[in-house]
Amino acid sequence: MSQLIDNTPSTPGKLKPEKSLYIHNRFKIHSSFSKLTLWFSFFLAFIIFFIIISLPATTPTPFSNRRSLGATWGGSDWEKSVTKSARRATNRAVLVTGAAGFVGTHVSLALKRRGDGVLGLDNFNRYYDPNLKRARQSLLERAGVFVVDGDINDEALLRKLFDVVPFTHVMHLAAQAGVRYAMQNPGSYVHSNIAGFVGLLEACKSANPQPAIVWASSSSVYGLNSKVPFSEKDRTDQPASLYAATKKAGEEIAHTYNHIYGLSITGLRFFTVYGPWGRPDMAYFFFAKNILKGKQISIFQDPDRGTVARDFTYIDDIVKGCLGALDTAKKSTGSGGKKKGPAQLRVFNLGNTSPVPVTELVTILEKLLKVEAKKKMVPMPRNGDVRFTHANISLAHQELGYWPTTDLETGLKKFVRWYLDFYSGSKKKSAW
Ligand SMILES: O=C(O)[C@H]1O[C@H](OP(=O)(O)OP(=O)(O)OC[C@H]2O[C@@H](n3ccc(=O)[nH]c3=O)[C@H](O)[C@@H]2O)[C@H](O)[C@@H](O)[C@@H]1O
């Protein structure tokens, strides 16, 4: 360093006599300096590269307000959890989308209980209280089911999951649910029920082996039909809500992927599913909450027929139907994105076959909660609701062995017991 200072010209343009030494040293120093810089840059690049690849990937979605809360995936620990969760004692490895949802939780637990490999996927969105979803996730984790925090619209994540696990089945229950909310947030229905479903089918069609898919459609596809009970053969081209329209679209999309790629696909039309760990946006749930709080509840009335009615179906019956569908699903026939032959395509009603007026639902809740409800009868708003639902389940009975055994009072008793236990005393647990 001192040499360099010594050889610095005192006058611009003039060099000191020790010019060559200076140049030589400068060259030497420059050269070792550049070498050092080069090595340092390599080292830095290596460190940055290493940090990037070991960082958990985030879930990209164009709908930032619907992002999974802190969704992360990737890394070797994450991969170990995925593999462990999907480990199986049977010949089935099932990816359950919407695993932290109401039906998803119950189905995942039932699959795990019988020895299937089960991996959950959920984006934990804020449509209703994420704390309830996290509580369901804890329940699943205690049972050995790992729930990946991610979105079905995340192509890279789905590809990765199918790379890590050769799923034999996909139980696709992730969706934007709720009939009335579709008027407030139509985009979320398109995002989850259409774009998300297509994304999932794309991943399934490219997977090797291609899994068989069982997915949640809805009784709402029967829309404004008046012929009862609703049969799978009936028309489904007059949906009353955007929600119903996206489920109907899902059924058509399923047809396309079955036709082009040989994917085995079974759609299940659920009829107003209720029970423990249920959804707080559903009437039975928020009626119970409001009755206990002494708040008024609105009971919708049809101007012609009086009260509206639903074919309320208890969760345990639905789980049996889901497992029946999974167990009778034939293999997909394609591979590498190419169809090799015709594949199975089915749709089933999963209902209770005994519609109950909403007024009766409220009477049962009052009895179980031992509180009289503050009821207000209101004309059914034009919000996408239909007047009644009633399932014909003979096809599901015949093909899946489906036979519901829980009446509304018995099922609500179990719901109320869970509700009081879950929300009792704990301030952390809010119903919304
Ligand atoms: O079976 C289905 O296909 C659908 O079932 C439910 O939709 P819904 O039957 O409308 O269930 P709730 O929202 O719980 O309503 C139940 C009944 O209560 C009535 N209701 C709802 C809200 C209210 O304030 N008052 C009232 O009388 C509704 O009109 C309906 O007859 C689910 O929310 C959908 O996600 C599902 O796909």
Image (spheres, rainbow, N blue to C red):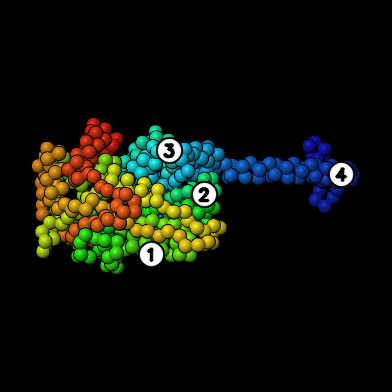
Please tell me which residue is depicted at 66% across the width and 43% down the height of the picture: 46
Identify the amino acid type marked 2.
Phe
Identify the amino acid type marked 4.
His
**Which is nearer the N-term, disc 4 or disc 2?**
4
Q: Quadrant of the C terminus?
A: top left
Please tell me which residue is depicted at 19% across the width and 52% down the height of the picture: 354
Q: Are marks 2 and 3 in contact (CB under 8 Å)?
A: no
Q: Please give the count of numbered marks on the rendered protein.
A: 4
SS for tag 4?
A: helix
Residue 254 in view of the camera: yes
Mark 4 surroundings within 10 Å by alpha-carbon count, few (fewer than 14), some (14 through 19), many (20 or more): few
Report the side of 388 relative to 90 (left or right): left
Q: CA distance from mark 2 to mark 3?
A: 20 Å
Q: CA distance from mark 4 to mark 2?
A: 60 Å
> Observer-nearest residue: 412 or 14?
412
Residue pointed to by mark 4: 24
| Residue 133 position in % (x across, y down) | 34, 42
